[in-house]
Amino acid sequence: MNIKLLILNSLNMFSNSEKIVANFVMENLIEIPNMSTNELAEKANVSVATVNRFSKKLYPTGGFPQLKLEIAMDSSSNGNSILNEFEPEDNLSEIKEKLASRFSYTIQRTKKLVEEDNIQAVIDCMKQEKIIFTFGSGSSELVANDIRQKFSRIGRNIVQIHDPHQLVVGMSTHKKSILIAISNSGETKTALDMASVAKEFDFEIIALTSNKNSTLAKKSDYVLQSDSTGEGALLRSSATTSLISQLFLVDCLYYAAIKNNFKESVELIKTTKEITDGLYNQKKK
């Protein structure tokens, strides 16, 4: 596991003083394995307790000794790692390698976060007779759209409305339904507003977020956790990798739902494909 990317992925967990340690570690990876906590604290101009808290957040059981070991073992800790941020001099081949590595890393991280019991609980919640509203803004709107187009094909009554005001109107006429709220940070204002309204209407709320301790997660009945990608990256590659993580999570939910009711789901998918193919062929004539 690349240490720099791990730290970037964990930035939202750190306090301001711990972020100072994070930046120092990323800039001085080669020297860290030979340092004590006291030396690192002194060089980073923070307390020893801050170094220990930072290390424990990365490695809860191993702390600073494990951090040093992981850095020493990480052959990609040098500045040329394909998992580092993009550089102006990168050619297309290097960009492809970095993107592929980031996507692979993100999916592996998300896979570890997917809890089978939690996925099954969400599927049970999304019963076919219930209306499911799905909402996300920005890049999360793409995820909401993916949920709508996938689950509508297997018989779920999915409603996606981009305008928050129209969404509130829709929810008000279908009380005791479901809202899937999508926010990578779990702190997006519009997502939180929609979750608050959904609570007033006695909805069950499913949160898709990278932060299980976020405000959105706390407002929700079920939380599907995606990878907490590195929001601190200069070129915001996280806007891409967080989307990949969310879409991977949606696919896990989708195929688990198909497995739960395989025969009927396959028939529905087949029927919708025949209908859409027929419409497309008619337009070509």
Image: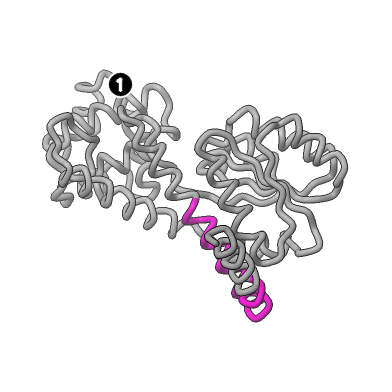
Q: Is residue 98 magenta?
A: no
Classified by dominant secondary structure, the portion drawn in magenta counts as: helix
Picture colour scheme: one colour
Is residue 258 rendered magenta in the image? yes
Taking the spot 59% from the left edge, 46% from the top edge, the residue there is 144
Q: Residue at x 31, y 23 (%)?
A: 20
Q: Is residue 199 left or right of residue 107?
A: right
Q: How many marks?
A: 1
Span of residues in magenta? 247-268
Callout 1: 10 Å neighbours few (<14), some, many (20+)?
A: some
- Residue 63 sits above or below residue 158 on the image: above
Residue 78 image point, x, y percent = 12, 40
Return the residue nearer the eye: 161 or 2: 161
The picture quadrant where one finds residue 64 is top left
The residue tagged 1 is 46
Q: Residue furthest front?
A: 285
- Mark 1 is on which residue type? Val
Q: Where does the image place residue 251, in percent across and percent down from the top left?
A: 52, 60
Residue sitting at x 27%, y 51%: 100
